[in-house]
Image: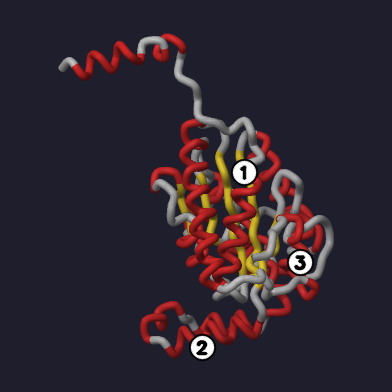
Amino acid sequence: MKNISKEEFIIDGKFQLKDRTTNYNIEAEEVTVEKELKRVRKKLGKLQDILYAHNKYAVLICIQGMDTAGKDSLIREVFKDFNSRGVVVHSFKVPTPKELSHDYIWRHYIALPERGKFGVFNRTHYENVLVTRVHPGYILGENIPGVNSVDDINEAFWDKRFEQINNFEKHVAANGTIIFKFFLNLSKAEQKNRLLRRLEKPSKNWKFSPGDLKERKLWDNYQVCYEDAISRTSKPHAPWFVIPADNKPTARYLVAKILYDTLKTYSDIKEPELKEEIKVNIEIYKEQLNNE
């Protein structure tokens, strides 16, 4: 099996998605990849227990991708061995009226993970520079002062929004949240195959929406917006990783491996030591219990 380095997938500056593979050759059979995923996710689960006891860091994992990129199943498989108290998944959909009555980052800020926990954002605050950029009319629903028509949503508007997102992530990271951002890079041909499977398998019909086909027609627009958003916001404290997503088992393994290899470098994440007065009296406490 190929030795994986996260540097292969991290983004540092401007890039083009067409130069990034959607089908990564990991040099192993699928059964081997799945076995390795199980091994790594068990290690992640143990690391999460230590993170919970340590109670100084939180971990935020942001997952973006086109429809059918495999976000839901990746979350299910990568975090399967976590203690349920230690990971919280938020799937962000169309903003509610209450969410629209606040600024666009508000609903994401209040969903941030507590210290000691993992938080997974299935779709993220980046929808506000992706979907809204492809469909700028959605911005009008935010009722922002000075934005009265689509004509007011110019490049200066997007520049300011990217600056706000970078500042948000910088603030969060500076206060103890370790941030990972993953873009699941799916090919247009594979998306077609997955949409067809949703239509052909009765058990998957519920996942299909005619809106998926409308958005598919805007594929090139989305690719440009993703390139720009990722290029502008991949920072050392909040890096973007572009993950080849045509093969689901491989994508899941890559995400799990990147998470574990990065988190294990935090040498200060360790189980807290017992207070000395408790440590020296452990035998006494044991004796008390045994003599009940």
Nearest the viewer among 127 and 43 is 43
Rendered residue at 57%/36% (across/down): 57
Residue under numbered circle 3: 227
Location of residue 58 in the rendering, given as x and y in whole percent from the top left corner: 55, 40
Rendered residue at 70%/48% (across/down): 238
Gap in angstroms between the C-alphas marked 1 and 3: 26 Å
Q: Which quarter of the figure is the N terminus placed in?
A: bottom right
Nearest the viewer among 268 and 124 is 268
Residue under numbered circle 2: 196
Rendered residue at 51%/71% (across/down): 31
Label 2: element kind:
helix
Q: Earlier in the sequence, mark 1 or mark 2?
A: 2
The residue type indicated by label 2 comes to: Leu
The residue type indicated by label 3 comes to: Glu
Q: Quadrant of residue 280?
A: top left
- Is the residue marked by circle 1 packed among few (<14), some (14-19), or many (20+) residues within 10 Å? some
The residue type indicated by label 1 comes to: Leu
Nearest the viewer among 92 and 146 is 92
